[in-house]
Each structure stands twice: as C-alpha cells, then as structure tokens.
Image (tube, rainbow, N blue to C red):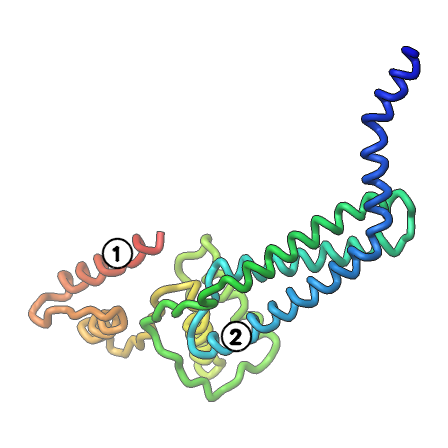
C-alpha cells in the first residue's frame, strides 16, 4: 500500500505537466493559424501608421518616440514569428509540443501591440525649427572622389573627434558645391543640429558684416554702437548658450 501511495504521489505531480505538454502539441496547428491572423492585422496597422508618418514627414513632422519604439517592436515580433514558423515546419514532435506554449505567448504579445497601436492619439510631432536655409545646388556632385570627400566631411561633422574642418583647393574644383550639399543635408536632418549657419567671408574681410550675418542666422541683434571685440563676446555668449542647451 505504501508503494501504491508513492506512485500516486508521483503521478499527481507528473500527469498535469504531461497533459499540458500534449495539449500544447495538439493546439499548435490552430495556434499557428491564430498567430498568422493577428500578425496580418498587426502588419496592416503597421503599414497604415508608416503611410501616415510619411505624409506627416512631408509636412516637416517627425515620429513620436513611442511610435518609433512600437514600429521596432512590431518588426521584432515579425522576425521572431518567422523563426517560430521555421521551427514548427521541421516537424519534430517534442519541439512542436514545446513550441505550442511559445506560439501562445507570441499571440498574446502581438495582440498587446495591436492594442497599443490603436491607442495612439497622435503619431508625429513638429520637428524643431532650424535657423538655416536650403541653398540652391545647380551643380550635381561629379566623380567618385568628390562624393568620397563629401562623405568624409559628413562623417567628421557627426563624430566627436574633429572640431574644425577646412576644405581647400584651386578654384573651380567644386569646394563650394560640396559645402552647399553638406549645408542642405544638415538642414534636412534636424535631429543632428539645432542651428546651421552659412556665411560668406568676403575679401577684404569685413568683420562687422560677418558678425552681423552670424547674429541674424542665430536670430540675434548686435548693437551697432559696440566695437568688434564686444560684439564678438556677445556672439560667443550666444553660441555657448546654444551648446549648453544641447549638452
């Protein structure tokens, strides 16, 4: 009797997991269909959101951070679902039983993100204004070497190792054209810089005019009565405040 009692005790703890294991195996096919259905709904929602973001992006708006995170997670769910489908198609009995529970969890997660997508009250926000202008570029970048130079300048601008960049060469080789393309690219990527200033330094140097152009680009007014040194100090203070606000 004691042995029977021990056997019954063992069965008490082993039968429910085995039963659940078989349940997951039997329901796998049905759950894969359910997963396919919820993913279709989720991806349709994703396409609608992406189309709306494109329209709002054309109006100068940018996606909200939570929307970007949602899109990234939906992409992750799709990738993980593809991996699950590949495992299921291998047809291994014990793997199929284990995957039954995984599929149920993925269905629940996909449904959760579908619900999150329905709860967005807005998808985009106004992009921060820039102080610069898009410059006309009638000349296209010519030659592989020219494009490499522009990409090198762009790489240094976005990095933190180079603080000053000089572009030099004989007249007519495209220095101004390269920098106009750089300026316009900076204007379009408003998440990189808050202020982009384009000024022309004339010869002979007119420092008062140069200071005035920089101040106008920063939406500042410099007193005409102040000397060059004080005006320079005022500009430095303005640019230091801009840098502090970005840090």
Which residue sits at x=45%, y=67%?
122
Left or right? Give the position of 7 relative to 221: right
Which residue sits at x=55%, y=63%?
117
User: Of helix, strand and loop, which one carries label 2?
Assistant: helix
In x, y percent, where is residue 241?
26, 56
Quarter location, residue 182: bottom left
Left or right? Give the position of 234 relative to 72: left
Which residue sits at x=13%, y=61%?
230
Task: Using the numbered discs, state the Cα–Cα distance from disc 1 to disc 2 in whole angstroms.
Answer: 36 Å
Residue 168 in view (yes/no): no
Q: How crowded is mark 1: few (under 14 residues within 10 Å), some or many (20 or more)?
A: few
In x, y percent, where is residue 71?
58, 62
Q: From the image, tell me which residue sits under label 2.
A: 52
Considering depth in this image, is 35 or 186 the residue closer to the camera? Answer: 35
User: Of helix, strand and loop, which one carries label 1?
Assistant: helix
In x, y percent, where is residue 132?
34, 74
Sequence order check, earlier mark of 1 and 2: 2
How many numbered marks, from 0 up? 2
Considering depth in this image, is 191 or 47 the residue closer to the camera? Answer: 47
Which residue sits at x=17%, y=61%?
234
Q: Is residue 139 above or below residue 155?
A: below
Quarter location, residue 43: bottom right
In x, y percent, where is residue 236?
23, 59
Q: From the image, tell me which residue sits under label 1.
A: 241
């Amino acid at each position: 009797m004691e042995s029977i009692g021990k056997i019954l005790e063992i069965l008490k703890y082993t039968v429910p997991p085995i039963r659940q294991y078989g349940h997951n195996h039997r329901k796998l096919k049905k759950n894969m269909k359910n997963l396919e259905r919820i993913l279709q709904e989720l991806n349709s929602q994703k396409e609608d959101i992406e189309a709306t973001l494109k329209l709002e992006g054309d109006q100068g708006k940018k996606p909200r951070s939570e929307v970007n995170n949602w899109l990234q997670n939906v992409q992750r769910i799709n990738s993980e679902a593809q991996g699950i489908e590949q495992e299921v198609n291998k047809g291994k009995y014990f793997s199929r039983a284990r995957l039954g529970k995984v599929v149920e969890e993925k269905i629940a997660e996909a449904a959760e993100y579908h619900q999150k997508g329905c709860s967005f009250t807005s998808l985009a926000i106004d992009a921060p204004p820039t102080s610069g202008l898009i410059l006309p570029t009638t000349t296209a970048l010519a030659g592989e070497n020219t494009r490499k130079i522009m990409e090198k300048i762009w790489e240094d601008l976005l990095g933190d190792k180079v603080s000053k960049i000089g572009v030099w060469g004989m007249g007519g080789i495209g220095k101004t054209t390269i920098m106009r393309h750089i300026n316009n690219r900076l204007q379009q990527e408003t998440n990189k810089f808050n202020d982009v200033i384009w000024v022309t330094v004339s010869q002979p140097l007119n420092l008062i005019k140069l200071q005035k152009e920089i101040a106008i680009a920063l939406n500042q007014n410099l007193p005409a009565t102040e000397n060059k040194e004080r005006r320079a100090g005022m500009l430095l203070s303005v640019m230091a405040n801009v840098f502090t606000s970005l840090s």
